[in-house]
Amino acid sequence: MLSPQALRNGGTPSPHRRIPTSTTHQFHSTVSEQKLRRFNSLILVFRLATFCFSLASSVFMLTNSRGSSSPHWYDFDTFRFVFAANAIVAVYSLFEMVVSVWEISRGATLLPEILQVWFDFGHDQVFAYLLLSANSAGIALAKALRRTDTCTDTSAFCIQSDISIALGFAGFLFLGFSSLLSGFRVVSFIINGSRFHL
């Protein structure tokens, strides 16, 4: 329907009722939706890789005992730190995978968008540094054990510790990639008010 001003200026009234448009909903093209879905799928792949490597690292460290005469992983504080850090990151990555699947399937974040963006970025940073410090400490202990009789008597213990630490570093690498993508989402949110530049 035209306004009285438009009618005075020679406009003709429309036979169709005008439907008011809402400014709260943003229009997303199909291409933009596909880009967002691909971006979220990439984050999901990195989260899955982080989960797998951190869980494998935890399992390798947890099962690193060869009998009563062999050293146990829990006898060393550093190896306990490696196990705990990888286990925490595995649980966090599992939670983030659920959040990513939610976001891909529903098209919305689990938490309010501003909280979700900062939650992901902050926790990615904290847990990446946790993994890096734990695995770096683990490498230092593994090198020190190589110079002692521990690794000459029971080399399987040292090899399995090395594998666990290497898997932890792989988990750190993929968590670092996730952190870069969550950082991109933070910057996009700050600049555009949305977690993805559309």
Image (cartoon, rainbow, N blue to C red):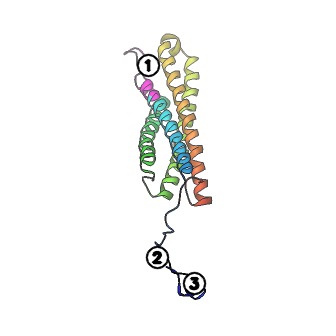
- The residue that disc 1 covers is 71
Q: Earlier in the sequence, mark 2 or mark 1?
A: 2
Residue at 57% from the left image edge and 36% from the top image edge: 132
Placement of the C terminus among the 4 image quadrants? bottom right
Q: Looking at the picture, how far across and down is residue 121, in whole percent?
A: 54, 49
Q: In the rendered image, which residue does mark 3 sit on? A: 6
Tag nearer the camera, 1 or 3: 3
> Image height check: is 118 above or below 148?
below
Q: Which of 115 and 196 is in front in this view?
A: 196
Percent position (x, y) of residue 55?
A: 44, 31
Amino acid type shown at disc 1: Pro
Image quadrant of residue 90?
Answer: top left
> In the rendering, which numbered label is found on residue 134?
none
The x and y percentages for residue 179 are 57, 44
The Cα–Cα distance between marks 2 and 1, rounded to whole angstroms, is 87 Å
Q: What stretch is highlighted in magenta?
A: 56-77
Residue that appears at 49% across and 70% down: 21
61 relative position to 147: left or right: left
- Eye-nearest disc, 2 or 1: 2
- In the rendered view, does 17 fall on the left or right side of 27? left
Q: In which quarter of the image is residue 61?
A: top left
Q: Is mark 3 on a helix, strand or loop?
A: helix
Residue drawn 56% across the image and 46% down it: 35
Please name the amino acid that badge 3 sits on. Ala
Marks 3 and 2, how far apart in space?
A: 15 Å
Residue 15 is marked as 2
Instruction: Assign a secondary structure to mark 2.
Output: loop
**Looking at this view, is 147 or 46 the one in front?**
46
In front: 35, or 15? 15
